[in-house]
Each structure stands twice: as C-alpha cells, then as structure tokens.
Amino acid sequence: MKIQLAATGALCAWACFSATVMAAEEGEVQDMSDPLAIYTQVGAGITDKGLNLKVGQSYDTGSPTTAGMNLIEVKGIYGDALGWRDEDITTDSVDSFRFRNFTVDVTKGRGKQIDATVNLKQNLVAEKSADISYGIMQALPKMGPVNLYPLVGAGVSMGENAIEDDGSIDSGYSIMGFYGLAGMYAKLAITDKIWINYNPFWLTTITGSDNYEDNYYGRDNGDILTHEFALSYQITPRFNVRYFANWNENVDFDDGDQRIEFNYQL
C-alpha cells in the first residue's frame, strides 16, 4: 500500500522516478526492487502452506503522466501435499486470492492502489471473508542505500455467513465493517543485486459489528501490527529470487508464514 519532499532531493527523486515509469511504458527492463515499478510479470512461490502463483500485467492508462498494472495472486495451492504446516492449518484447496490495481502518477510521484483479498478459510467472524482497500503510497527522497515508501489507506470487510453479535449467522454475503491501515515499505540496498525489505503495517477496525471490531484480527484483537521481511537476489535484470517471512504481534517469527518466491519480468 510519501508525503512531502525537500525541494532539491525531490527534483532528483522524481526525475529518476519519471524515467523509470516512462521506461516501463516503453517495455524496458524495470528495477524489480522498486515497489513503485510498473511491469508485466509472472511469479511462483514455494511456501509453508503450499504453492503461490502470481501474474501481473501493465497497461496503458490513456494518460502520458500515469502508468498502470493489474496483479492477481492465488495462494495456498496443495497445502497438505506441498506445505509443511500442520494439517489443521493447511488444505489441498486454495487458501486465498488477491487482486491489486496499481497506478502511478509521475507528476506527483505517487502510487494509488486498490487491493482486494478473498480469504477462503473460516475465522472468528465469518465462514469466508474479503477485504477491499484503497491506499496511497509515495516514495520519499533516497537516503544513501535506503528507500522509504509510506502508505495509508482504508477499506471494507465483507463476510459470508458472518457471525452476528448475538451468535446468530447472517447467511449469505454482508458488510461486516470498515478498517484503516498505515505502514511503510522500506528497502536497504546491500549491492546492486542484493536488497533487504522490511514492511511494517498497522491495521485497525474503525466501525462495524461488535464481533468484527473486537475479533477481526484475532480473539479480542481489533487492531494488529504486522511485519514482513524479505531478502532478495537479482539473478538477471529480469529474474529474481526472494525469501519472505510474515509475522505479527501475536505470532512469532518462527511460527509466521515463510516462502521462497521466483519472479520473472516479461
């Protein structure tokens, strides 16, 4: 899921950024370590909960100052057969789907994202759930080997057969509530081929049913701080391999999600 820029640093940052986006529109190889880069891609991940597949397609927005990309991910395929979690956590069916529409305005150096995730596993508030959010991200001026990309957003949570406050089931699909999020993508360049990312995000329910507000992020948790760590190696300008770890304030690093992901830029 970039606020303001000092005058001198801003001009340099946005000049470089504009060149990156224009190159994307011309089909040139993009910097795959940049969260704001726009390019067509395919990817696959080997995870503790099965296989993940990803397809991304850049597109012409019709404006010379913007570039766009759609990204679809399918997660948790054959979790019992290929993952290494307990069987009560994984299944051989798909765990979740994720769709993102991402656009970048090069005149403002700002990314805007629609992010929709459908979770097919039961949780404390519904049999199945979906989160749809809108976020704004903007790159801050580079500080030596460090790049920071703050993001803020808000979204709506929907559920299938949601559990009401009195314990009854609201059959079918319904809106359970609304939430906010704030966080940051951070990149540390070790070499021109190796980089580290740390991406913390805080999510909180804003309004909705009592059950949603109190338990959406775990029992008696209406908000949560999540963490993502990634170590990446650029094998070729178009192909990289990345190790990811995801955990949160209630789940230790060792018990969090682990995956190795391969990405290829078309």
Image: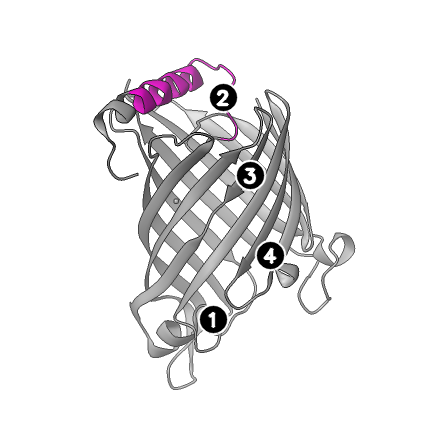
Does 128 lie within the magenta span?
no
Q: Residue furthest right?
A: 81
> Which residue type carries mark 1?
Ala
Q: State how far apart marks 3 and 4 are (Cα).
A: 27 Å
Span colored in magenta: 12-33
Which numbered disc, 4 or 1, marks the residue that appears first in the sequence?
4
Residue under the image location 52 percent in, 41 percent down:
197
Which numbered disc, 3 or 2, marks the residue that appears first in the sequence?
2
The quarter of the image holding the N terminus is top left
Which numbered disc, 3 or 1, marks the residue that appears first in the sequence?
1
User: Can you tell which mark lies on residue 196?
Assistant: 3
What percent of the width, then of the height, locates residue 86?
73, 66
Which residue is under mark 2? 30
Marks 3/4 in contact by CB < 8 Å: the verdict is no
Q: Residue furthest left?
A: 7
Q: State how far apart marks 4 and 1 are (Cα).
A: 15 Å
120 on left or right of 206: right
What percent of the width, then of the height, locates residue 180?
32, 58
Residue under the image location 65 percent in, 52 percent down:
258
Which residue is under mark 1? 126
Residue in the foreground of this view, choosing between 38 and 242: 242
Q: Nearer the viewer, mark 4 or mark 2?
A: 2
Secondary structure found at label 2:
loop
Marks 4/1 in contact by CB < 8 Å: the verdict is no
68 on left or right of 34: left
Which residue is under mark 4? 95
> Which residue type carries mark 3?
Ile
Q: State how far apart marks 2 and 1 are (Cα).
A: 40 Å
> Which residue type carries mark 4?
Asp
Marks 3/2 in contact by CB < 8 Å: the verdict is no
Residue under the image location 39 percent in, 32 percent down:
143
